[in-house]
Amino acid sequence: MVTERSDQRREAGQRTREALLAAALELLAVRGQEGVTLREITEKAGANVSAVSYHFGSLKALCDAAIEHALERYLDAQIDALESVHEGSGLEDLAAAFARPMMRALAAGGRDLAVMRTVARVGIDPPEGWDRLAGKFEHTRRDAVRLLAAHLDGVGEQELAFRTRCAAGMLNWLALAPIGQELAAMPAEQVERQLVTVLAGAFGGTPSMH
């Protein structure tokens, strides 16, 4: 009986922790870290202030945990997508893989889109703890550059890395700008067709000669 009660308390605590993370993520996606209050998070999560202290220690630690969770989910999804592309694939296949987490988030809405918008915000203003995920950022950059290099003879690695960063920046902007809301209202096939075409063009442009 004691063990059963202990398990129930542990499960309740885990549900509260997850609810706090979900509430923080949703609010961070809309306002960024400076616009989120402890009261709003706890009200949305149906929890009390002491639960934040117990599970995270502070509002900042909760927000950092939510941001890190969002970044890790996004990077894992992008790594999986890029690893499904082989070097014989076309630029549009690479663009589709690179944008897949964004396109899926636009189609799904809800928490998936909140994750993408949180990633977009912190891409502009990186949080503390970003370095912990440096290996995954490097993994996505390395995979994208390797696949691009197979198509673009004569374009140096530095420029390919720059194109990759620009493509990521464009996706971040789309997540936050009004056009992102327009895309979210479109059929998934139309979003993919328009977005992949633009990204493939950005990846494959001919460098200017000086």
Image: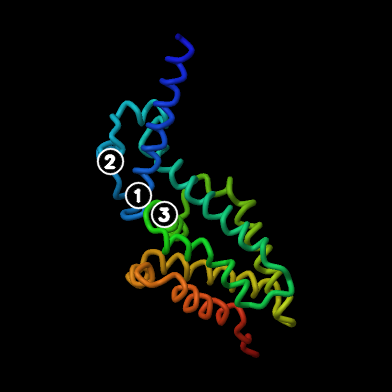
Residue wearing tag 3: 118
Q: Amino acid at mark 3?
A: Thr
Height in image: 32 above or below 175? above
Q: Are marks 3 and 2 in contact (CB under 8 Å)?
A: no
Kindly report the distance in space between the C-alpha atoms of the residues bearing marks 1 and 2: 9 Å
Closer to the N terminus: mark 3 or mark 2?
Answer: 2
Closer to the N terminus: mark 3 or mark 1?
Answer: 1
Q: Quadrant of residue 56?
A: top left
Q: Quadrant of residue 179?
A: bottom left
Give the SS element for disc 1: helix
Q: Amino acid at mark 1?
A: Glu
Q: What color scheme is it?
A: rainbow
Residue at x 52%, y 55% (from the top left corner) = 74
Q: Amino acid at mark 2?
A: Lys
Q: Quadrant of the N terminus?
A: top left
Height in image: 159 above or below 3? below
Height in image: 24 above or below 80? above
Height in image: 160 above or below 6? below
Q: Are marks 1 and 2 in contact (CB under 8 Å)?
A: yes
Image position, residue 178 (x, y; %): 32, 70
Residue at x 73%, y 71% (from the top left corner) = 87
Residue at x 70%, y 80% (from the top left corner) = 152
